Amino acid sequence: MKNIYLAFFILSGLLLNAQVVFESSLVMAFKKAKQQNKPVFIEYYNSDCSVCKRLGAILREDAAVASYYNANFIGYAMNTYDDLSKEDKMFMEEANLNFESVPVLLYFDQNKNFLHHSNGQIDEETVVNEAKKALNPMYNSSGLKTKYEAGDRSVRTLYAYSDVLRINKNEALLQKVAQELFESFNKAELPTKKSYIILKQVVTTSDNGFFQYWINNLDGLKGFEKGIHEGTEQSHLQTIVLKELTDPNLKSWNTTKINQFKAYILKLKITDNPNVFFEQS
């Protein structure tokens, strides 16, 4: 009988270690983080999202991922399906984090300072690598700001810092850094997926060099998305143009700018009558 109980407890331990442990509340997560001197990992997801389900399977079924996260982080899962709880919503507002899609891997130090996030590719290797970045001062949020202010204008730093500025909605600085990113970017790589990902993730204005490149090379802006997003590449240019057409100062645009946007509208096939945007102004 003792052997049966021993086997049961061993099996229970193995099953527990095969999945990331999530605390029941944010309060408990940060309490344990201070007690164990660990940062906090938050799975920001929606239980109705197919990509989120894939992330969930990795976090709850992959033993190597679970082992790394349980050893280095205190976990908490934040489900957006029925809107966030009051506690979770307040936490995100205080952290000044704004995400338009899920899932997102979020990392904070034990004092609730934002360290790192990732809402890119979801696979076992990436999930572990993003956690390692959160633990590395050279990659986390404060480290990126320090590197940028010290004069680092490498593509890696500028892209990562732009992504942080985007979710913080620091639009003015984001535009500046994203343009510096274009200036530092290897122009031979402009027709590649790497350039497209930058457009998709951090470009928010038509003045940016990546926007200008792709608006003038629409024939090449295809084949980067697969599955349900296949063929949506131009939508990112459309979103930028439509957002700028809501400018409250639209009436004061000069003729050159108006004609430029009419050309964008026609190129992107938003409508075959671009005048409608300016007649209403």
Image (spheres, grey):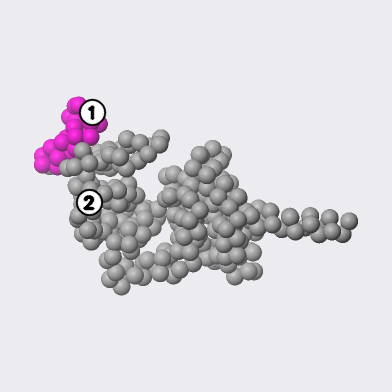
* Above or below, comparing residue 217 to residue 271 in the picture: below
Residue 13: x and y, percent?
Answer: 71, 58
Secondary structure type for disc 1: loop
Residue 219: name its quadrant.
top left
Label 2 crowd bin: few (<14), some (14–19), many (20+), radius 10 Å:
some
Residue 29: x and y, percent?
Answer: 62, 59
In front here: 186 or 82? 186
Residue 125: x and y, percent?
Answer: 48, 56
Amino acid type, residue under disc 2 in the picture: Leu
The residue mark sitting in front, 2 or 1, is 2
Residue at position x 23%, y 53% from top?
189
Position of 94 compared to 33: left or right?
A: left
Label 1 crowd bin: few (<14), some (14–19), many (20+), radius 10 Å:
few
Secondary structure type for disc 2: loop
Q: Main secondary structure of the magenta part?
A: helix
Residue at position x 23%, y 48% from top?
191
Residue lying farthest left? Answer: 256
Q: Magenta includes 191?
A: no
User: What residue is shown with label 2?
Assistant: 190
Q: Earlier in the sequence, mark 2 or mark 1?
A: 2
Q: Which mark is residue 219?
A: none
Check if mark 2's residue and mark 1's residue have beta carbons within 8 Å.
Answer: no
Q: Which mark is residue 271?
A: 1
Residue lying farthest front? Answer: 3
Q: Magenta includes 258?
A: yes
Residue at position x 32%, y 62% from top?
156
Q: Which residues are magenta?
A: 255-277
Residue lying farthest right? Answer: 1
Position of 255 compared to 115: left or right?
A: left
Residue 30: x and y, percent?
Answer: 60, 62
